[in-house]
Image (cartoon, helix red, strand yellow):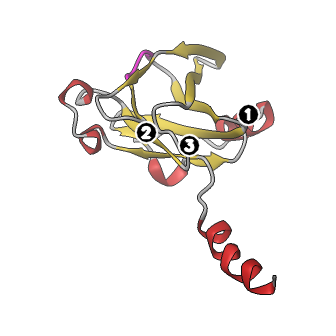
Amino acid sequence: MRWVALFCFPAFAWAQAFTFEIGSPVASQDFATKSAAFVFRTAGCAAPEKPEVSATAEGLVEGTRRTLPLKVNPSSKPGVYAVFQQWTGGRWMVVLKGSCGSAQAGAIVPVGPRGFVREDSKFFTHPATAAEIDAALKAFPEGGYK
């Protein structure tokens, strides 16, 4: 019985949690997404065509908090999605939310005039909470991302 436990453990250690991975539009290798603000893919879902994903834009425009529901566009590759810019003015970030069965994931992706800001993006094993979104908005550089 001990051997069975030893041989089964590595499978659990290598299992990947459900999460998001972000990239530039060319990373999707799909012509239809080339003008997106960014693309993302789901990872750690046994059926890449099955996750449910949604996105909102959270921003500050002239000091006023704004929330915009965003359309998430599936690419021609299973589990790969594009987010097109649907916001104007102000400072914005995209909040991703997803589920695959009972597993959940979330991400906060700041965007600037040159696209998404990878180094300040945050990834979670749960949908981002209101407090996490507020903290990310407060952490925005004063003049926004360049």
Badge 3 is on which residue? 141
In this rendering, the label closer to the viewer, 1 or 2: 2
Q: Answer with left or right where residue 77 lies relative to residue 96.
A: left
Give the amino acid type for the residue marked by disc 2 in the picture: Phe
Question: With respect to residue 122, does 51 lie above or below?
Answer: above
Query: Mark 1 or mark 3: which comes first in sequence?
Result: 1
Badge 2 marks a residue whose secondary structure is: strand
Badge 1 is on which residue? 134
Q: Quadrant of residue 37?
A: top left
Q: Which mark is residue 99?
A: none
Q: Answer with left or right where residue 78 lies relative to residue 52.
A: left
Outermost residue to the front: 1
Query: Mark 1 or mark 2: which comes first in sequence?
Result: 2
Question: With respect to residue 138, does 44 lie above or below?
Answer: below
Q: CA distance from mark 2 to mark 3?
A: 24 Å
Query: Mark 2 or mark 3: which comes first in sequence?
Result: 2
Residue beneath the point at 51% across and 22% down: 90
Badge 1 marks a residue whose secondary structure is: helix
Front residue of this view, candidates 105 and 116: 105
Give residue 110's position: percent from left, percent from top.
52, 38
Give the amino acid type for the residue marked by disc 3 in the picture: Pro
Give residue 88's position: percent from left, percent from top.
43, 16
Outermost residue to the bottom: 3
Residue extent of the magenta highlight: 84-88
Badge 2 is on which residue? 40
Q: CA distance from mark 1 to mark 3?
A: 14 Å
Give residue 15's position: percent from left, percent from top.
61, 62
Residue beneath the point at 56% across and 27% down: 53
Residues packed near mark 2 inside 10 Å, few (<14), some (14 to 19) or many (20 plus): many
